[in-house]
Structures are given as structure tokens and as C-alpha cells.
Image: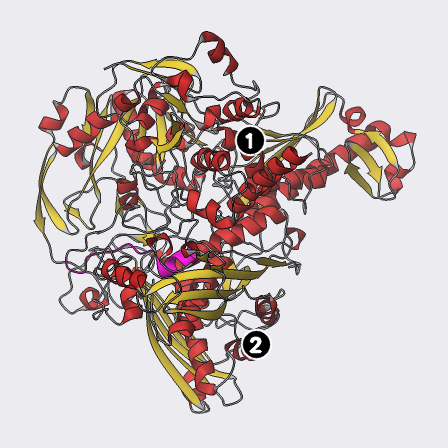
Amino acid sequence: MRVNLTVNGRPQEADDVWEGESLLYVLRERMGLPGSKNACEQGECGSCTVRLDGVPVCSCLVAAGQAEGREVVTVEGLAEYARQRAAGRTPGAPEARAGESASLDAARRWQAGGTDSQTGENIELAPIQQAFLDAGAVQCGFCTPGLLVAADEMLERNPDPADEDIREALSGNLCRCTGYEKIMDAVRLAAARRSEGATT
Amino acid sequence: MTATGAPTGLTQGSRTKGGIGESTLRPDGVLKVTGEFAYASDMWHEDMLWGQILRSTVAHAEIVSVDTGEALATPGVYAVMTYDDLPTDVRHYGLEIRDTPVLAHGKVRHHGEPVAIVAADHPETARRAAAKIKVEYRELPLVTDEASATAPDAVLVHEHRTDRHAPHVPHPNIVHRQPIVRGDAGAAAGRADVIVTGDYHFGMQDQAFLGPESGLAVPGEDGGVDLYVATQWLHSDLRQIAPVLGLPEDKVRMTLSGVGGAFGGREDLSMQIHACLLALRTGKPVKIVYNRFESFFGHVHRHPARLHYEHGATRDGRLTHVKCRIVLDGGAYASASPAVVGNAASLSVGPYVCEDVDIEALALYSNNPPCGAMRGFGAVQACFAYEAQMDKVAKELGLDPVEFRRINAMEQGTPMPTGQPVDSPAPVAELLRRVKAMPMPPERQWESSRGADVRQLPGGLSNTTHGEGVVRGVGYAVGIKNVGFSEGFDDYSTARVRLEVAGGRPLVTVHTAMAEVGQGGVTVHAQIARTELGVAEVVIRPADTRVGSAGSTSASRQTYVTGGAVKHACELVRERVLETGRRKLGSHHPAWATAELLLEGGKVVTDGGEVLADLADVLEDEAVEAEEEWRHRPTEPFDPRTGQGNGHVQYSFAAHRAVVEVDTELGLVKVIELACAQDVGKALNPLSVVGQIQGGTVQGLGIAVMEEIVVDPVTAKVGNPSFTDYLLPTILDTPALPVDVLELADDHAPYGLRGVGEAPTLSSTPAVLAAVRDATGLALDRTPVRPEHLTGTASQDPPGGARNVTSSAPPGASAKSRSARGT
């Protein structure tokens, strides 16, 4: 079957999709977006977390066909998503996504910010991405994409979370390397930077 | 075309000086937070096929027949291979003992053993085709524990053993046995005022790295193969892979792909040979990615263990003697079992002074899942038991458990049970003092004006208690781990370092085969290069087999050994640069000949800080390169009868204090805080060091209260191969983790550093168990501790493991939680 969806603001189309394929598989293997990770493919680890019409989901548990006509944001689009949100636009807002593809203009705005993928320099990061780097929340990094998407969504809803709020929101994302303490630090840091930015 | 996702060099910018001792950020960090970092499972190649492995459904059986006809006839299938299709007579592999069949022949020895492999154009096609292979088994009697392994009529797991341990073991179903006898434990027992014995059971833990076993094999035009794979030791893989393929090692070109964690679980081969076989058979690139279910069968686990201890002490709190017997279950294949035995035996007393010991450790062959390397191996199991014993003896003597440990704590110079003196700082008492001195978390921290925050209580959002029946406990533990490969192993690493001027600026390139598995070795190598060569910009080349072996990313050894190799290669480069400078510019300034010269800020400077020349002027368009092997001090084997010998190169120490709260009605445990103090010699990157300590601490928490692979004692089948049933700590299960880092230099090691990664995994588990005992008053002789052990509802543990897969939610829990809420 053919599946049409909007990924990180760009209309995407996949052909010859077998009905049993997950959204995760189609993103990774058919659309060249392997940032969402395949740690368990059972909905237990959260490493494949993406936003589907704004809602964080385990993309391994979403059949590709269920994503037909919908808006998906993956870790690859997180920086631009955050940039638009900061600019007051509402990426993936309900009025813009009801079954229609993003306009060409919108798609252009979703062009990846940086070009230097080897060094990572000159890439504009989302605040949560920068906070993960600065706090040392990344070791092997396999859980990182899902955690970033989940943490960014939590901070969108709750800009000033208590520690227990952070733990509750991220309890569906397993990490085996860090013991989570530096992930806590990263989310606290992102929240603090945001509130500093809001008051100054 | 080349494979997509092949790793490129990592360049770290020049904003900071970024030498050792600074918390520089990971050079691969930006790629990892943007989703662009290519893990092994992200590899892609035009026209690639997907490989799938068919695994045995029974633990021990003769293979009567294998029929691949229907699988081969499936549209989309390119190849099906069994043992009979292997290209050479080398059909086994193994880290030390080559006892593991590439594909089963005639017999399977454990649940999940590879029997056949399939390549197809879609992963689901490959899976379905594999399921169509008909294998007829005739089941054999099982070896599942020590009794069945060493019974007079025991089935032999491996007949006709020829490995080097075979002549020394009391039974062919024992992989390796290491006794250690020092002093006279029997006579010393006569001096003891108290003698305490205990029997302990340690469950089977899984590494549960998040990035599943994966790789891509691309056949080469020269008949060779390019393999991109996530592993811990490229050259060890290569040594095992090439002979099976019938290729010389230079035709198997290995490159490290992004590794999603390892923790020992990638020390053995998994899909490497299978992918290469299918690629060479089909002439097409073949990718294999395990799913989580398969991953539980696709790598070795931490050895479960039965441990018997006897400790004696005088009334004034001094240990008189220790006797112990540690039986590790190695499962069906040897893997790292011999080294695990050596560690368990030599570290079995812990970081304590005790002159009179009688120790025996051994690993069984059985039909249980193969066990091998996992963070802290051998030492983790022993620490759980000896620390439980230390608490018991302290209680018997009426002493504070920390005070009792302090009285017996080893120091620099104390001999190990092996007779080897610990010849660098051993701040055991100081680490305990520090964790004890940390402020305690507040009592009833869940209480607020709005009532109880159940997220901070045992049972969490299950809302099982609002504080009723909740009791707090505190426990302490300390441990000792060896660093580096031991027992005479030639433990070296290789580094190639190049210094040149590019675009007018000096640039260092570091090339090693070190497997970056998340620990931050790439960060540290760049820091070392900056410190040694005074150059801000450092490129870390991808790890591959075009440079010499780096040894394994295990045994807490990479910063020590490959870090040491990078430092050494940098020193050689520096000498050559200075020679060049003296030759070209020596006549310009007398200091070239007389002063101690350094490289700093891209310049040659005197130790007094005077600038002699820019590197750009010294080097011009010349590049200076050095590649050298580097070794730590040699070790020696343990005597096979007495266990005496200088077997280890360095020791690492950590101590924990655990604070837990236990819902005593439901047997649910919430760890409130897990504080650690560790001596790291020198923190090359403090941020990474703390990350290692916290990560290791939580893996220890996991084995204390959650994690266990449940193997059926009757069928030897794995009962919980999924993240649904194998419980890993989540961020909700994890407490605050304060860390206190000590830096007491080991003068034998580069920069005085001490391997960091494993020690925190040791003492974490017994500290949590001690805290749970403190809260409940129960003896608790097994780990993980489960609700039924705390509520008195556990029946006798069957030999070999647990019964109840859903142990974290006992049947009574939901009903009870309703009544708890109603009160």
C-alpha cells in the first residue's frame, strides 16, 4: 500500500508498504529517518517516541497505515519544531493538520537548520537538545531521541516541572547508561533556562 | 557505492582548551541529540538483504533432521544456510575456548541456540521463512545446576574437551575452578569469638543495552567482506570471524558502527559471522538487526551464582578468617567463564584485611543460557555475599556495620588473598566515612500540604499506599574490583596519532580501534591529545581494523590502556616535532637546546613559558605520525592449587549508602537515595566519571530489587525475554544519586587514573539489600529481592532460579491496594 504523511513538516510518501509495517519501520527504513530508535519494538522502552499530531507515541506500536494523512515530528525535526514554537508559530497545530499536507512554504521552513552533519557545528539545537549535551545526559545515546521528544513535549505542557513531574513524564523511556540523574539535570536545566529567558 | 551510515571522523571544535581534568562535552554528542549518529542498526545499503536466525526451541536435544526446502522456496528468500553449508572446517568460535558452534550441529545445548540462517529482501519475509524451517529434535536430559552437573551419571554438556582448563577441573561439566589458600583458615577459626555462615543466591542479570545486536556485511570485489558492527573489541571479533569464513584477516575489514551500550554483552560474537556468511553466499549486502526478544537469546548474561561463606571475628571486631565457595553457572558455552572464576575467587574476601582464607570458585557448564561478561563480573556476585556477611558479623558482635568495616578495611600495602599487595591507594575506610557523612534525605519526603505524593512512595502511581506500612532502612556496602585484563594476559592497546598543519592551523588526528560504546573514550582521547600536544583541534577517526588492536572496552580498562596508548603516541609525536624544530630553528634561540620544551596553544614553548615557534613554522607541510602499542605492567597467572600470584594490575574501590522505604504489607521497595563515594585516581573528565558512577549504581539497584532472567528449572527455557517481563529500572524507580569523587593518584597509571566503570556496580546491590534488611529485619539471602520475599509469601526457591515471571506484581497486590486506599 501507499502511505502519505507529513514528517517534520514535509509531505512524505512511501510505496509498497506491507500492512504489518510500523510507523517506526517506515520512518527508519523507507524515509531515511533512522533517528527514532528500535530498542524494543514492544512499546516498553520509549526510544522510538515521536509526536503524532502533537501527541507523544511509541512509533513501533503505530501501524504505518494509521499515520496516513497525519503529522509526525521526529528527533530529526525537533530543533525546527522548537524554533517555530519559540517564534510563536504552532507547528502541527490542529487547524494546520486536519488531513492536509503542509504548504510548500511551510515545508521550506522545515529545512534542517544546519548543513555540517559531520561536526555538528553550526546546527541550531532545540533547548532540550542543548541541555542534554551540557548536562552530560548522553552516553551511548540510543535512548536519547525518544527522551528528547518526550521531555520537549512535557516542558511544552509544564514549563516549570517538579522533579516528580519529570520522573512521571519520562517513566516510559528506558535508559541503561546514565542512571537517569543527568537526564533529570538536563530537563531541570532546560526548564531553568527557559524561565530565565522568560523573565529577562 | 558505500554503505549509508558508515561512521565519519568526529571533530571537536576549538572553543575550549579542553585538556584532561576538564568536563569537555562529547564529540559525538551533537550527532546523538539530532538523531544523525549512525548506530549499527541504522546502516543501509542499496540492494541489501535482511538476515534472520532460527534458534532452538528446546534447551538440550539431538537434532534429528533439518528441512529447509519450504523456506528456500519462499519468494524473496535468497539463501538459507545450516551447519552443512559452512565454508571451512573451522566451525566454532569463542573468546578463550572455541566451544561455540557457528550453527548447531547434531545437538543444541541451550534454549535459543542458532540452528539456521536466512537472507531475504524484507525482514518479515526472512522471519517467516525461518519459521518454515522444520527442525526435528530428540530431547536429552538437562544439566541445570551443580547437582545435575556433577552427579555420577551426569550428561556431559561438552564431550572430548581439549581446552587448557580441562586437565585441572574435577569434572568435565566444570569449565574452570580456582582455589585460593592462604594462611590456615582452620586454625584461625579457633581464635574466632564469633563465626557466621551464610548461603546466598545471585540471580541472572541481563546487560539490556538498548541498541540491539546489529550489523551490515558488504561483500567485496576481492572476495573479502566489509563488516560494520556494534561490538566491544574489533580485533577479537576479527580473530574469531576470519577463520570461519576461510578468509585471511586482511580481507575481513571491520569498522565500528554506533554502539548503543554494551556492559559486557557485546564481548562475544552475535550476528557477525552469520551476516558475513550470508553476504558471501548471496553476493549482496546483508543487514541483521535483532529485536529485543532475540537479543535476550543473542548474548551472554551475568552468571547467576550460589555462594557459601563463613566469616570469623574476634570480640574486638577483627576478622580471623574467611572460607567461601562460589558456584557460578556458566551455561552452555564457556564465553568469559574462566576469567569470571578468577575474579570471583581473587576478590571474594572484599577490601578487607584477612590473612587466613580458604576459597574456591568454579563455573559450571550447564544447559542454561550461556553467561559471560557483564560489568564487574565475578566481583559483583562476591560483593553481594561478603557484604551481607560483614553486616551479619557486625550484628553478632554488636558493632556498627560501618565501624566493623573500618576496623577491617584494607590500606595501601595490604596483601590480597592471592598474596599480591595492593600497591596504590586503597581508601576503603575513607570512602565509607564519606558516604556516611553525607546528609540524609528528609524523612517522609512524600508528605506535603496536599497529602501524599504517591510517586515518591513504594508502589508509586499504582497508589498502593499513602505511607501506611512504610518503613525506612539504611544500608552500607563497599567493594573492590580489578581494572584491566588479569592473570598474565597480554593486555595492550594501540594508538596512531598524527600532527599536521591544515588550513594554517595545527590539527591532531587520533586513530585507535577502541570501541566507543557510550562510555566517553572518544572524549577522553581528544582531551589527552590536547594536553600532550597543546593543539585545540582534534579529530577522532572511526575505530576500525586498519589500526592495531585496542583490546576490549571492558574491565574498566579503556581510559587506562587505550588512553595510555594515546598518551604514549602523543609523546612520541611531540619528541619528533621538537627534533624537527631543533633541526630547523635551533640556531634561532639557545633554549631549543637547553630548556625543557612543551607544546602549548599551538606553539613550542619553554617550561618557563617563553614561545619559541609556531607549530605551523616548525612543521610547514610536514606531518608527524606515530603508531605504537602500549602495555600496562604485566600480571601473572594464579597458581592453580594455591591461587597465589600477582594476578591483577590495579584495583578500584567504591562505597554506597542506600536509603530505602519498604511497604512491608505489600513487599514493595522504593529506593529513596543511593549515594556513592569512589576513588578514581584522576578524573580525566569529571562529568563522564560521575555519569559512569551513576549508571553503574543504577545497574546495581536493578539487580537488587528488579532484574532477573527467569530460567525454568525443569525445561531450562527462558521465561521473560522482553522488557515487559524483564524489569529494568525506570526514571521513577531511580532515586537521587549523590556522588563524591576522590582522586588519589595511582603512580603506576597514566595521569594516576583508576578505571571507573565497574566498581560502582559492585557495592550498590549489597547496600540496597542491607537497607531493605534494616527496614524489615528479614535475612534476605537472594537477589533480586521480590515482594514475596518481603511478605513471607515466597515458597522455597527451586534450584536454579525463580518461579514467577510476574513477580513484581504478586497476585494479591491489586486487591490489597484497594483495601489500602480505602483505609
Give residue A20's quadrant in the image. top left
Q: Please state which of residues A96 and B224 is positioned toward the viewer in this rendering.
A: A96
Q: Is residue B161 left or right of residue B465?
A: left
Q: Which residue position is annotated with label 2?
A: B406
> Under tag 2, what secondary structure?
helix
> Under tag 1, what secondary structure?
helix
Q: Callout 2, which amino acid? A: Arg
Location of residue B133 in the rendering, given as x and y in whole percent from the top left corner: 12, 33
Image point (33%, 59%), residue name: B464
Q: Residues within 10 Å of mark 2 (few under 14, many from 20)?
A: some
Q: Residues within 10 Å of mark 1 (few under 14, many from 20)?
A: many
Q: Eyeballing the image, is A141 above or below B155?
A: above
Q: Is residue B642 something one can see in this rendering?
A: no
Location of residue B77 in the rendering, given as x and y in whole percent from the top left corner: 19, 22
Q: Is residue B711 magenta?
A: yes
Q: Callout 1, which amino acid? A: Val
Disc assigned to residue B253: none
What segment is highlighted magenta in the picture? B699-714
Q: Which residue position is annotated with label 1?
A: B30
- Answer with mark 1 or mark 2, whichever residue precedes in sequence: 1
